[in-house]
Amino acid sequence: MSDGACIQMPYMPGQVPIVTENLYLTGPDDNYAEPGTHFRHAGVANVGFLDGHVEALRQVDAPVPASWNAVAGALAKQAGIGYLNRTSVELYRPN
């Protein structure tokens, strides 16, 4: 569990991407992955783990989805929305 936000892509002509709340997290390797962690606390996100501990983690350098346009990518960067880890398995779906 972490601070969450996402980029809502436009669904009508003339609209622009906007920042909205996010209720789920996917990793960069997952199907239909989108950045969903909000690094809103001076560049870190508070992340709660199943064993009960909490860590303040920084965003990793992972690309936004290839289907996103430049406006959506810039908005994600400006708002501090990204991924916790470069791969899904290590953190999003641990063994």
Image (cartoon, rainbow, N blue to C red):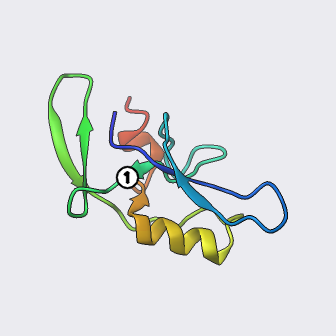
What is the count of numbered marks? 1
Q: Which residue corresponds to the image point at 50% horizontal and 53% vertical from the top-left?
A: 35
Q: Is residue 46 above or below residue 95?
A: below
* In the image, residue 40 above or below residue 94: below
Which of the pair 75/61 is nearer the observer?
Answer: 75
Secondary structure beneath label 1: strand
Q: Is residue 64 left or right of residue 40?
A: right
Question: Quadrant of the image for the N terminus?
Answer: top left
User: Is 58 displayed left or right of 91 in the figure?
Assistant: left
The residue at the point 46 percent across, 45 percent down is 88
* x and y, in percent, of residue 81 in the image: 43, 59
The residue positioned farthest toward the top in the image shown: 51
In this rendering, position of residue 7 left or right of residue 32: left
Of the 4 image quadrants, the one containing the C terminus is: top left
Task: Please tell me in which quadrant of the rendered image residue 72 appears.
Answer: bottom right
Badge 1 crowding class, 10 Å Cα cut-off, few under 14, some 14 to 19, many 20 or more, is many
Q: Name the residue at 43% across, 58% down.
A: 82
Q: Amino acid at mark 1?
A: His
The residue furthest right is 13
Say which residue appears at 37% left-offset and 52% top-offset.
38
Q: Position of residue 74 (x, y in %)?
A: 53, 75
The residue that disc 1 covers is 38
Q: Position of residue 51 (x, y in %)?
A: 20, 22
User: Percent from the top left, x then y, of residue 14?
Assistant: 80, 68
Residue 77 position by quadrant: bottom left
